[in-house]
Image (tube, rainbow, N blue to C red):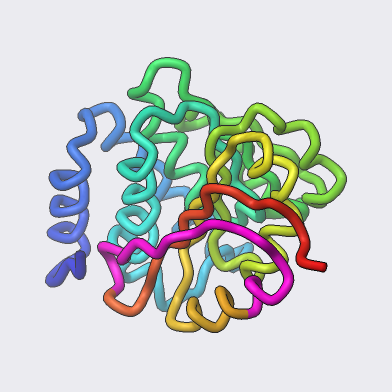
């Protein structure tokens, strides 16, 4: 989806296609307002992306929900400004039992996430910590996400215990996705497929269904 026209039109297109409730739409509006307010102080996202925030960030995150319609226990690594984790929590709360754990090592970004979770009432918990120190806590996660965090090979290194335990990875990637897959394949044995992004014709979502370990 490449929404055109004004920001308001873009918002309406995204919300209509997502099919969210009025309450969820209001919570997403609040998230965008928070992001805009904090951006001037914390530089949470690329400044140029705010003008198209509904397509670049909201819709880009929401498309992940449709890829795992039954999952209720999500883990987002390197959450930053809450993309996609906090956006998923806001929209996913319409599913009974839905919950997202967000891991972010930067204290300032963690403060933004904590405050925005409080204001939106999103079913999310913030963990201000390095991934490798807390990943073992989330063994019951069903879906692991990470956007613009690290190459796929490193993501597999962090999430291997979870993926071996039955979780799936949903990792949005840009135009270098094939290079990342090749490099990861030189180190790891894993099963993955590429799903076209609905918001960027050059982007793909790497869905990792299993990892069997490091290659000899």
Q: Is residue 111 above or below residue 197?
A: above
Query: Measuring 43% from the left and 61% from the top, which residue is drawn there?
Result: 193
Quarter placement of the N terminus: bottom left
- Residue 26: image quadrant is top left
Q: Nearer the viewer, residue 2 or 5?
A: 2
Q: In the image, is 53 to the left or to the right of 106?
A: left
Which segment is the magenta one?
Answer: 183-200
Residue that lies at the very extreme toward the front in this rendered image? 216
Q: In the image, is 115 to the left or to the right of 32?
A: right
Where's residue 105, x and y in %? 77, 53
Q: Is residue 121 visible?
A: no
Where's residue 135, x and y in %? 77, 42
Q: In the image, is 135 to the left or to the right of 47?
A: right
Q: Is residue 27 above or below residue 189?
A: above
- Residue 162: image quadrant is top right
Q: Is residue 14 visible?
A: yes
Query: Measuring 12% from the left and 71% from the top, which residue is drawn there?
Result: 5
Query: Measuring 27% from the left and 76% from the top, which residue is drawn there?
Result: 201
Q: Nearer the viewer, residue 93 or 68?
A: 68
Q: In the image, is 97 to the left or to the right of 167?
A: left
Where's residue 58, x and y in %? 35, 53
Q: Nearer the viewer, residue 127 or 143?
A: 143
Where's residue 34, x and y in %? 47, 48
Query: Measuring 35% from the left and 45% from the top, which residue is drawn there?
Result: 67
Residue 113 lies in the magenta-colored region: no
Numbered disc total:
0
Q: Is residue 11 above or below residue 24?
A: below
Quarter placement of the C terminus: bottom right
Residue that lies at the very extreme toward the right in this rendered image? 133
């Amino acid at each position: 989806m490449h929404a055109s026209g004004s920001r308001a039109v873009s918002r309406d297109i995204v919300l209509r296609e997502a099919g969210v409730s009025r309450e969820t739409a209001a919570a997403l509006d609040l998230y965008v307002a928070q992001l805009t307010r904090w951006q001037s102080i914390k530089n949470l996202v690329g400044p140029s992306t705010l003008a198209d925030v509904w397509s670049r960030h909201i819709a880009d995150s929401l498309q992940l929900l449709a890829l795992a319609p039954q999952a209720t226990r999500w883990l987002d690594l390197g959450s930053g400004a809450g993309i996609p984790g906090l956006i998923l929590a806001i929209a996913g709360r319409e599913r009974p039992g839905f919950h997202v754990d967000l891991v972010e090592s930067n204290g300032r970004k963690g403060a933004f996430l904590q405050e925005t979770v409080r204001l939106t009432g999103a079913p999310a918990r913030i963990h201000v910590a390095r991934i490798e120190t807390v990943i073992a806590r989330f063994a019951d996660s069903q879906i692991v996400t990470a956007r613009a965090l690290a190459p796929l090979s490193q993501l597999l290194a962090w999430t291997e215990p979870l993926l071996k335990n039955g979780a799936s990875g949903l990792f949005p990637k840009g135009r270098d996705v094939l290079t990342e897959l090749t490099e990861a394949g030189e180190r790891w044995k894993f099963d993955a497929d590429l799903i076209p992004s609905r918001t960027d014709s050059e982007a793909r979502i790497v869905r990792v269904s299993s990892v069997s370990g490091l290659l000899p």
